[in-house]
Amino acid sequence: MTREENLDILNNAELLFDEDTCRRALQRMADDITAQLSASFPLVLPVMGGAVVFTGQLLPLLRFPLDFDYVHVSRYGDQLTGGGFNWLRAPQHGVAGRHVLLLDDILDEGHTMAALHEKVMGLGAASCRCAVFANKLLDHDKPITADFVGLDVPNRYVFGYGMDVKGAWRNLPAIYALK
């Protein structure tokens, strides 16, 4: 897409959550994660690339020791609808016996997070918790629920704060929806 097409997407989008609301939601999440995981020396595994913005904002707010690695699995690519899984990188740190915290930008249908949770537990993790910045509200059950959620978003195509639209706008400090 061209620069102008991407600007047109943003100019015609609806702002759902402004930067201040996102910042407050992130701080609340960090407080909840700290309260529940600070004594466990967790292994934090963000899901690249969507979780990069969320992770970069969250980690400095977690004031306890943790190990860090990442996984890279793609389900959407730059398409607007789901496709197959593409495993690009598995955890490199030992997962066996560890308390793991998976981070992702959004829990949409939940298939990617459910598959990651299953993989981590299959590698012998002592526990696996999931944190997502956005949880899409659907009218049906998901295969997994997140333990920590920043914001609930409507069942619309949302972008910003790590979530992209056709590969762009992950860098926005707020959450928008296509009209």
Image: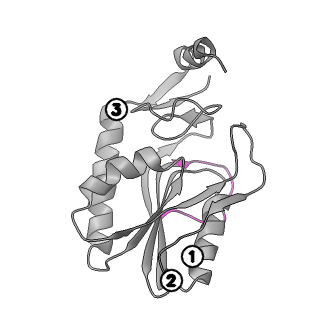
Task: Using the image, determine if residue 81 lies above or below residue 98.
Answer: above
First to last magenta residue range: 135-146
Pointers 2 and 1 in contact (CB under 8 A)?
yes
Q: Which residue is mark 2?
A: 125
User: Which residue shows up at 33% across the image and 47% down it?
Assistant: 57
Q: Using the numbered discs, state the Cα–Cα distance from disc 2 to disc 1 in whole angstroms.
A: 6 Å
Query: The N terminus appears in which quarter of the rendering?
Result: top right
Residue 128: where, in percent of width, then height?
49, 75
Q: Secondary structure at mark 3?
A: helix
User: Which residue shows up at 36% across the image and 39% down it?
Assistant: 22
Q: Magenta stretch containing residue 140, yes or no? A: yes
Q: Is residue 167 visible?
A: yes
Task: Using the image, determine if residue 9 lies above or below residue 23.
Answer: above
Q: Of callouts 2 and 1, which one flags the residue occurring earlier in the amino acid sequence?
A: 1
Disc 3 marks a residue whose amino acid type is Glu
Q: Using the numbered discs, state the Cα–Cα distance from disc 1 to disc 3 in whole angstroms.
A: 32 Å
Query: The C terminus appears in which quarter of the rendering?
Result: top right
Disc 1 marks a residue whose amino acid type is Val
Tell me where residue 154 sits by quadrant. top right
Q: Is residue 141 visible?
A: no
Q: Of callouts 1 and 3, which one flags the residue occurring earlier in the amino acid sequence?
A: 3
Q: Using the numbered discs, state the Cα–Cα distance from disc 2 to disc 3 in whole angstroms.
A: 35 Å
Q: Magenta stretch containing residue 141, yes or no? A: yes
Please give left or right for residue 7 compared with residue 31 in the image: right
Disc 2 marks a residue whose amino acid type is Ala
Q: Which residue is mark 1?
A: 120
Q: Secondary structure at mark 1?
A: helix
